[in-house]
Amino acid sequence: MDVLALTYPEYSDAERNAVVHAHPRSNQEDIIQAFYDGIKRKPDTTFGNVKTDVPADNDPTFKRGVSWLCPT
């Protein structure tokens, strides 16, 4: 709900506030670092999804995969 907000409208203000109270938000850089820490040992899992920007921004040696559907 917090990162992509796909189901945001399905929750009341009280429910959203309870989640934020239970899990306080940190700054955006902390979230990006947490994503990177989780995928840095398996960068190929980012192929074809939004997480490919995370290693691209954090690892100068990272090479994005090329899709056979949309070659670049």
Image (spheres, rainbow, N blue to C red):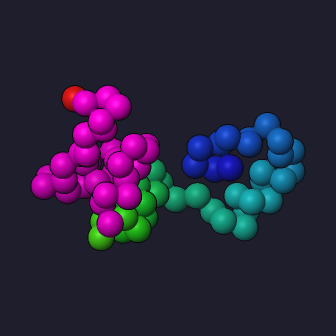
Horizontal placement of 37 versus 66: left or right?
A: right
| Label tally | 0
The answer to whether residue 29 shows anywhere in this view is no
User: Magenta stretch containing residue 68, yes or no?
Assistant: yes
Magenta residues span 42-71
Counting from the top left corner in percent of width and height, residue 65 is at 25, 45
Q: Residue visible at 30% across and 38% down?
A: 67
Counting from the top left corner in percent of width and height, residue 44 is at 31, 58
Residue 26 or residue 54, whichever sits in front: 54
Q: Residue visible at 37% across and 53% down?
A: 46
Horizontal placement of 68 versus 26: left or right?
A: left
Residue 20 or residue 5, whichever sits in front: 5
Which quarter of the picture shows residue 6? top right
The answer to whether residue 35 shows anywhere in this view is yes
Q: Residue visible at 38% across and 58% down?
A: 45
Q: Residue visible at 52% across and 59% down?
A: 26
Horizontal placement of 66 versus 5: left or right?
A: left
Which quarter of the picture shows residue 55? bottom left
Residue furthest left as drawn: 61
**Position of 20 relative to 53 (above/below):** below
Counting from the top left corner in percent of width and height, residue 4 is at 59, 44
Horizontal placement of 7 versus 60: left or right?
A: right
Counting from the top left corner in percent of width and height, residue 40 is at 30, 65
Q: Quadrant of the C terminus?
A: top left
User: Magenta stretch containing residue 7, yes or no?
Assistant: no
